[in-house]
Image (cartoon, rainbow, N blue to C red):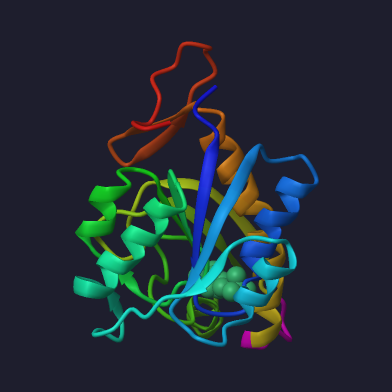
Amino acid sequence: MGQKLRIGILGSGSGSNAQSIIDAIEAGSLDAEVVCVLTDVEDAHILARAAAHGIPAEFISAAPYKTKLDGEGERRYIEALQAHGANCVVLAGFMRIVKPGLLRAFPQRILNIHPALLPAFSGMASWKQALDYGCRVAGCTVHFVDEGTDTGPIIVQRCVPVEEDDTPKTLHARIQVEEHQAYPEALRLLASGRLRVVGRRVVVDSSEDATEVPGT
Ligand code: GRF
């Protein structure tokens, strides 16, 4: 068993994934603590979700950049995560590219969820990309974050069918139902201390004395 996960969640929007993680912890199916929720959007609904569960929730400006977390903004986020004692960072709808400073502060301890079966359809509105492409299946991916965009080693993937009458909205909603299972599942694996990254692959060790991901 690794050290207990002390999760700092970064999000920019509704926070339904953050909610699924909080719910899993409260239901006793994930042994972890959410130590803070941080957002770069002043009125993001994720703040209210966290506050409703007594979790410290803060807007932190990510200025001066608009699409990445870098420079002074990055420094503010790292300081807040460290001040709350986070040992793991969960990106849950955080609409910025994270840069090496954050990666170095939490090596192999930053996870992201992407609403597509990577490596297909990285980037924005990937459920619409899958629909427009004519895919018969779509899904979501939870992965470790590395220096690329949506390129880190994959921990969990779940798929959904694409229906004839789907719109981007209905397909995204179906994918989100799976996201809310996938994120707690990936965090349970991380919390178990049994994950190893071997090249591009994430291996789940079954032996008791497995080599752990650094820091677990
Ligand atoms: C999710 O679809 C996630 O895959 C993507 O952003 C969305 C966030 O949704 N990265 P929510 O804020 O968790 O509801």
Q: As drawn, is 172 to the left or to the right of 132? A: right
Q: As drawn, is 194 to the left or to the right of 34? A: left
Q: Residue at x 56, y 68 (%)?
A: 57
Q: As drawn, is 162 to the left or to the right of 132? A: right
Please give the range of residues in magenta.
163-168
**Within the magenta stretch, is there residue 67?**
no
Q: Position of residue 148 (x, y in %)?
A: 25, 61
Q: Quadrant of the C terminus?
A: top left
Q: Position of residue 43 (x, y in %)?
A: 56, 87
Q: Would residue 115 be visible to someone looking at this image?
A: no
Q: Residue at x 45, y 72 (%)?
A: 94
Q: Position of residue 9 (x, y in %)?
A: 51, 60
Front-most of residues 79 and 124: 79
Q: Residue at x 42, y 80 (%)?
A: 124
Q: Would residue 16 be visible to someone looking at this image?
A: yes
The outermost residue toward the front is 83
Front-most of residues 151 and 42: 42
What kind of secondary structure does the magenta stretch mostly adopt? loop
Quarter where residue 13 is shown: bottom right
